[in-house]
Each structure stands twice: as C-alpha cells, then as structure tokens.
Image (cartoon, coloured by chain):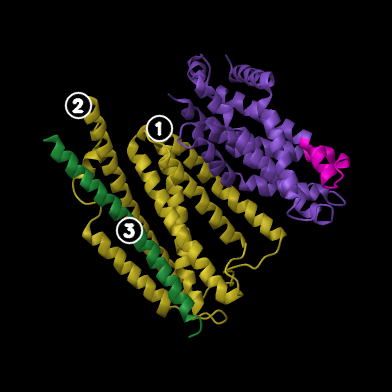
Amino acid sequence: MSIARAAGIILAKELRTEFRSRELLGTTLVFVLIVIVLFSFTFNPTSEESRRFGPGLLWLAFLFAGSLMLQPSFLREQTNDTLAALRLAPIDPFSILAGKMAANFLFLLLVEVILLPVFAVLYNTAILPVLPQLLLVLALGTVGLATTGTVFSAVASQARLRELLLPLLLLPVLAPVLIASTESTIGILRDPPELSLVWITFLTSFDVVFLTAAWLVGEYLLEE
Amino acid sequence: MKNLNFLVAAYIAIWVVFCGYLFSVARRMASLQDDIRRLKRNGK
Amino acid sequence: MATEAQSQASSGPAISLPSILIVFLLLAAASYAALIWAPTEATMGLIQRIFYFHVSSAWSGFISFIMVFIGSVAYLRTRALKWDWLAVASAEVGVAFFTIVLITGPIWAKPVWGIWWTWDARLTSSFLLWVLFVSYLILRTLLDEPERRALVSAVFGIFAALDIPLVYFSIWWFRTQHPQPVIGDGGSLAPRMGYALLMCWAATLGVMTVLIRVRYHLEAMRSEVDAYRMNVSRNG
C-alpha cells in the first residue's frame, strides 16, 4: 500500500474518532475563547492598540491551543494500546505519523477558521477583504504547528509528566512560527494590506524543514 | 578605571558558572562511585 | 552487553593531566590577552573586555549544540549508546556556555546602555536557544528506560538543532523591522582585539572539550552501573 493511501486511512480513522465525540474540538474552541477574552484585559482592545497587539495574541492563543489539542493525538492510543495494533499493519510507519499530522492540521485549521470572525468582531478588525491572504498565512502557520506538534506529541507521550512536557517542548521550537505568522498577519491587517513575501517564504521553509525531518526521523518514535 | 566593578562581576560570574558545572559533575561522579562500591560489596 | 566504550569507562580517568594543564595555560593566556594585552576600547572603556569571553562562549556553545545534532543523528543510525552520551554531554556543556553568555550580556549592557536587558536580536536568540536545550535536558530526566531515552531525545535533539537557524533568521528579520539598540556592533576590531578574541575562543574550545569528555565519562559510568543493576535484578 502506498504511503499516501495508508495515511489517508489513518486520517479517516482520526476524523471518525473525533467527530463521534467532538470533545477535543469543543474544548479547544472554548479554551481559545477564554484566552482571547482574558487578553482583552491586558490592553485596550478597541483602540489602535488592537491592530498592533491583536495578531500576536491571536497566534499565541493558537499556539497554546495547539500545545493542548495535540496532546491526545498519541496519548489516546495508549489507553487501549492501539498504537501497537497500528504498528502491526503492513504500512510504512511514516504514514501513521502523516495521517495524524493531516488530522491535527485539519482540527487546528477548523478551530482557527471558526475563531477568526469572533476575533474580528471582538477586536474590531475587518478581515473579509483580506480573507485569502489570511487563510494562506493560517494554513502555512498551522502546517508548522501540526507537524512539530504531532511529532512532539509522540515524544511527550513516552515520558513522565507528559501533559506538562508537550508545551515545554513545543513552544520554544515554535517561536519562529509565532514571529513569522504574527508579522505577516500584522502586514495583512495594515491599511493598505501587504503580504510580506519574506515571512511567507520563511513560513514555507519552516514547514518544509520540519516535514522533511519528520519524514526522516519520525518513524523511530513509533518503534516498540 | 571606570566600570571596573562590572568587569570584575562578569569574570566572577564566568568562573562561578564554570566551577559550578564542574562541581555538579564531580558530585554526580562521587555519588555514582558510592553506588559502584555498594554494588561491589553486595555482589561478593 | 559491554561495548568497547563501556569497558573503557570503568578503567582510567576521563582526561589526562597534560590536557588539563594545556587548557589551564590556554585560559591563563586568553585571560591575559583579554584583560591586559588587548587595547582598551575608546568609547565603552574597560567593560568592553567582557566581549572576548562573552562572544567566544557563544561560539563554543554553538559548537556544542551542533554536536548534540551529530550525536543524535549518529545514535539513530547506529544505535550505539555512546552517541547518546555525546549528545547529553554536549547539551549540558552548551547550556553552561549559554548561561555564561546570558549572564555576561546584561552585565555588559548595564553600564553601556543603562539597561540590563534589551530584546536585541542576538541576546534574544541566545535566550531562546538556552530554553530550547534546557527543555531537551528536562525531557531526558523524564524518560527512564535508557534505550527509549536515547531514541526519543535524539529525535527532539534533531528538531531542536534544526530550529537554531530558523530562530536566528526569524529574530534577525523581526529586529531589523523593529529597530533596537544593537549590542556589540562596534564596527571593525583592532588587530589585537581580533587576536585576543581568537585566543579566548581557543581557550573556551579547550574547556568545552574537557567538560564534554568528563561529562561523557560520567554518562558512560552511569550506563554501566544501570546495566549491572538491571542484570542483578533480573538474575537475583
């Protein structure tokens, strides 16, 4: 079976598991809402300030959401030792990782797309005219978040204190993504909007570097 | 000779970190050696 | 399972006396070069003499982190635990060097700019690098089984090392868009300053080698003790 097909099956399995309960998506959505509301107390959200700080706190909220949401990705497999069963399947081990990455990417993107209008209303920003550019940045940033996050979820799931460990491992590595996506979002929300090529290229290279790394070393994490 | 105190502070900091690290390795080494001695005694 | 490195571990010291002597001579010479021999900088004065060990510690810390990468990759390829020992030894020594960088940086900044910390590109990236490898070391303490620890932390070590250039580029571009006071950009160095810096770098590289060897030796011994314990508990 080809890697893509196997990954597709894993992806379908992940989506089915999640949409049966929807607990992960619901919890993460509410979590990000709480973060956005709490952030509004740290500065004056209606003024010119929100244009400067808004994108940064939005991305910070997404990063936090990712570091919580990706936790169960491998932990969930441990309760019934289903990862061992997956490993026994006659498929390339990377396809397990790839399927999970794709699923996490979709979950995160869904959360972000739902929250974007909420954010726009709460923080007084017009996003409709620049929606395509915003979606591009969201997608690129989320690929980086989902790639490293899925790998680190596998890393953390094998250690003690795993719940605490994932944010600790993930957030420093994602600092470049935070900078790049915040800067490009600020550029897009500026008047007139501008899409910063430097940052888009940077985000793309971040994604390529870590996707390649995950492809090269990720399968070791699934070893028994 | 202005700022001599800052220079001295910086060099003290460097040596403190250096010696502190050496000390921590030495301590870990010593406790390991204790373990080895205990294991050898119990092994006989 | 006694590999060659493991049997070496128990016999003989990790470092020879001559190598310690050489490193101390290098350190003395470098300190002399940095503190006395190099000319005093015109505008910053004496405080600029921190620069030599500050910068060379950062360079040596970098090399240590690159060795974490090498050790991690080599472990994944060969599955010989000695590469894991190299990775953990280098990570600890690198963190120690960057601790020096992060302490001497503010001590330098205070008299020159009047503030302890500026979110200058280089200081910020050093800070992030330090955090990155501290979390690598924390990860290791939370994994118990030696082979599992080696494998999992090697993957994280590779990811952390790949992140280094990305951290640098992103922060550098970020800071060029938001002007900040730049630390240590004093234009070209006087020749003697350059030599003093090289001396200091040689000395910190020597220190780095000795520290990594000692730490490697410790890890090798610990591994041997663990293996022995495992045997005893299995047979007894």
Q: Tell which subunit mark 1 falls on.
A: C
Q: Residue at x 87, y 39 (%)?
A: A128
- Left or right: C229 in relation to A66: left
The colour of chain A is purple
Nearer-the-camera pick, C5 or B8: B8
Q: Which residue in the protein does label 2 denote?
A: C236
Give the residue type that dot 1 points to.
Arg
Compared to A48, does C156 lie above or below?
Answer: above
The region drawn magenta spans A115-135
Check if residue C67 falls in the magenta segment.
no
- Left or right: B40 in relation to C224: left
CA gap between label 3 and label 2 equals: 37 Å
Disc 2 to disc 1: CB gap under 8 Å: no
Query: How far from the left and from the top, in percent, is residue A183?
Result: 73, 50
Q: Which residue is drawn at 57% across and 49% down?
A: C165
Q: Which residue in the protein does label 1 denote?
A: C148
Q: Quadrant of residue C182?
A: bottom right
Query: How far from the left and from the top, in percent, is residue A138?
Result: 73, 38
